[in-house]
Amino acid sequence: PERSSGEGAQSQILRSPRLSFASIDKIFVTHMHGDHVFGLPGLLASVTNAKKESRQAGKEQPPIDIYGPQGLGEYLNVMGMTNTFETKPRFNLHELKDPDYVGGKRLHHQIKTSGPGAGVFDVCEDDKCVVKAVMLPHAPNMKSIAYVVQEKSIVGRVDVKALSARGVLPGPIYKRIKNGEKITLPNGDVINGADFLGPRKPGRKIAIVMDNKNSEGVVDLAYGADVMIHESSFEAGLRKVAEKKGHCTSKMAGETAREAGVKQLVLTHFSNRYALLNSVPGLPGVDLLVDEAMEAFRSDNVVAAIDFMSIPITRASSD
C-alpha cells in the first residue's frame, strides 16, 4: 500500500477502517515541504513498532521502501541523530536524482531517469504493478514528484466450456491452466493451458499529481489513466496567485486531465479559502472548483476528494 507522509498521516490511519501501520511497505514522498514530510518520522516509528510486533509473532517483515526527492535522506539522517526513533526503523531509501538539486552528499540509492531527455523515472516494480514518475515545477529551487501507478495485466478468463469438452472440470488443475502450463490428462492427452485462456485483462492506472504550478509534464506518462488525483488549490480567476504560490487552479487540473485522456479526475489540496462542502454566502466551496474543472475537462466525471473516500476502479474489458 502507498501512503502520504503529511503531519496527519498517523491520525488518519488510526481512524481508517481499511489501513493499518503493519500493512505499509512502501512510502512515496512528493517533495520536501514540511506539510509533506514532518509526519514521516512519526509514521516510520509507528510502522516500525507495528512490524516489530508482527516479527515477534513469527511473521516475516522486510524493510520499508521509501521513495522521494534528494534531500530526504539527509532529513531522515538528522532525525535519527536526534534520537527521534526509540526503535531504529528498517528501511531502504531511494532518492530520485534531480540534476538541478543543490544539497549535501549522496547518502542513499539514487534513481535516475530512464533515458536521455526522457525525464521519466522507473521508480519501482513488483509482480503486481509498476510505478513511474516525473518531476514538475513547484517552488523556487524545489520540484514536486508526480507518481503514476500502472497495474500489470492479469490472466484472461478460463474457457470453461472448452475444457469441459476435453473432460477437464473446475478444480486445482485450473491454477496450472492459468499459469499456461502443459498438462497431461488422465487419458494421456496433453493440453496447453494457454490455449484455454482469453485475452489478458489490462491493468488499471492511477496518476497522483500533487503540489505543482504546471502539470503538463505528466500528460504523456499519465495518458489514459483510469483516475488522476490532481491538486486544485485555487479557482481559475486566481491563476496568478496560484502560480506565485507554486500551485494549480481547478481549470489547470481539468486541462491536464483532458490532455492526458484520463477517465476520472479527483481534485484535492484545496486552499482554506474554500468550504469543504458546497458554497455558502460569503464563502465559496469546493463545488466551484469542481464545476470549473468539469468545464476544462469537458466531462462531468470530476469529484472533490474527502477523507476516507473510496473510489472503485473497474478493470477494463479485454474484449
Image: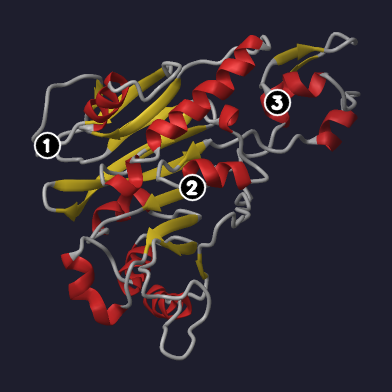
Q: Quadrant of residue 87?
A: top left
* x then y, percent, for residue 138: 20, 54
Looking at this rendering, what residue extends furthest in the bottom direction?
A: 281
Label 2 to label 3: alpha-carbon separation: 23 Å
Disc 1: which residue: 101
Q: Is residue 272 above or below residue 288?
A: above
In the rendered view, does 111 fall on the left or right side of 224?
Answer: left
Q: Which mark is residue 45?
A: none
Label 2 to label 1: alpha-carbon separation: 29 Å
Q: Quadrant of residue 248?
A: bottom left
Disc 2: which residue: 205
Disc 3: which residue: 178
N-term-proximal mark, 2 vs 3: 3
Please name the amino acid that badge 3 sits on.
Lys
Please name the amino acid that badge 2 sits on.
Lys
Q: Is residue 300 above or below residue 12?
A: below
Number of marks drawn: 3
| Residue closer to the observer: 291 or 46 | 46
N-term-proximal mark, 2 vs 1: 1
* x then y, percent, for residue 65: 41, 25
Q: Nearer the viewer, mark 1 or mark 3?
A: 1
In the rendered view, does 221 fall on the left or right side of 44?
Answer: left
> For mark 2, does the 10 Å Cα neighbourhood hold few (<14), some (14 to 19), or many (20 or more) residues?
many
